[in-house]
Image: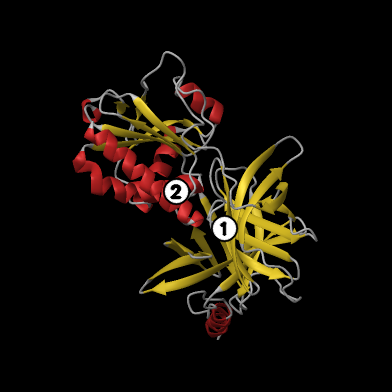
Amino acid sequence: MKNFFFLTLLVLFFSCQSNPQKTTLPDKYLVNLAVDSEFIPFEMSIIRSGENWYAEVYNAEEVLVFDEVNFEDDSLKVSLGIFDAELRAKILKNGSLDGFFVKNYLNNYKVPFTAESFGGSRFPVSDEVEADFSGRWKTLFQTEDDSYDAIGIFTQQGNQIQGTFMTKLGDYRFLDGNVSGNTFQMSAFDGSHAFLFTGKMEQDGSITGRFRSGPKYTESFSAERNDNFELPDAYSLNYLKEGYEKLEFTFPDVNGNKVSITDPQFQNKVVLVQLFGTWCPNCMDETKFLGPWYEKNRDAGVEIIGLAFESKPDFDYASSRVKKSMEKLNASYTFLIAGESNKQKASEALPALNQVIAFPTLIYLDKKGKVRHIHTGFNGPGTGVYYERWVDEHNQLIKELLAE
């Protein structure tokens, strides 16, 4: 009798436990990252494929696929691709999520979030649309200590708005949001960074607004329509110091083997040296281009060396992050562990450069090993025609160097 009573209790206990793989999950979530007194929203789906699960995150036209989703009891964990970061959440009975966005390489970086069934609007829309933000905007971002120029590019249909901001060092990728009254809100989440832009159209047609990145960082911005304003030429920002024509470096590859720029495999070839980090979304975008491009062009006499500057000085940690990036981004070219993700230390590792001012930076070497061009930063697919223009420029530069 006692055994029967005990078994009955066990059955009742386990029948009350949530089985997340049997819980009905929404087709799409609206995830809200809680930062101070506001939220940074993005859209996400958790999808089953056979016995496996994966997540999709949606930023305007972009779909990011994260193929490591794991369930344990009533919780799930989404590993965020190349980034050493995760979404960890408890699955509630109605399929909603309650958890944290965690960056594993930073101490105490935990941003709380909730996720509920997506209702069709990323941001609340309560007023009539009173402003059209479509177009090209000369933008000035400001902090207490600094300022920098940017170009805002927006398209708007009704209360839906998408776009990005380009800076001389890179773009803010695919932004998506809504217009309510004379105000827009746009956001993005790429697995590493969470962005929120809020802008208001003033009576004179200009925009004033605020930019938030993650839980703490904010900037103000102002913008005015301008179809002619251009950012500095990305090929003019970096150069070699006087007396230098070539780069000289030796760093370990992901397996610990020393590799030098003067090794035979790079001789008499056009070589691209990419300054890169697995923590860097713009680097991710550039590598997504360079990986397949290298496969198509390597037989023509082209090599690429990715110099990885990582968030921790530990070699094993850095190597594991780079190996994962190579796999996720389909990049089979040479990657070396060059140091920490610090521009000053990166500059010390490459003393021939005037300075390292952006990740990524792409350095073009001719067949004699001489530095011919340096492209600073990267404005990726979210910039549309500007990205396409860079692809054309890049291919033309390679064509000319191969012809020499």
Q: In the rendered structure, which amino acid carries the disc numbered 2?
A: Met
Q: Quadrant of the N terminus?
A: bottom right
Quarter where residue 188 is shown: bottom right
Label 1 element class: strand
Using the image as rendered, state which of residue 400 and residue 271 is in the foreground: 400
**Taking 147 as reference, is 262 left or right?**
left
Q: Residue at x 50, y 25 (%)?
A: 347
Using the image as rendered, state which of residue 164 and residue 38 is in the foreground: 164
Q: Are marks 1 and 2 in contact (CB under 8 Å)?
A: no
Q: Is residue 324 visible?
A: no
**Taking 258 as reference, is 174 left or right?**
right
Label 2 element class: helix
Q: Is residue 39 visible?
A: yes
Q: Which residue is mark 2?
A: 284
At which x and y percent is residue 334? Answer: 31, 37
Q: Residue at x 45, y 48 (%)?
A: 284
Q: Residue at x 66, y 48 (%)?
A: 139
Q: Which residue is mark 1?
A: 189
At which x and y percent is residue 34? Answer: 70, 60
**Taking 129 as reference, is 310 left or right?**
left
Quarter where residue 189 is shown: bottom right
The dot on residue 215 is none
Using the image as rendered, state which of residue 148 and residue 350 is in the foreground: 148
Q: Residue at x 55, y 38 (%)?
A: 232
Sequence-earlier tag: 1 or 2: 1
Crowding near the residue tagged with mark 2, few <14, some 14–19, many ≥20 C-alpha atoms within 10 Å: many
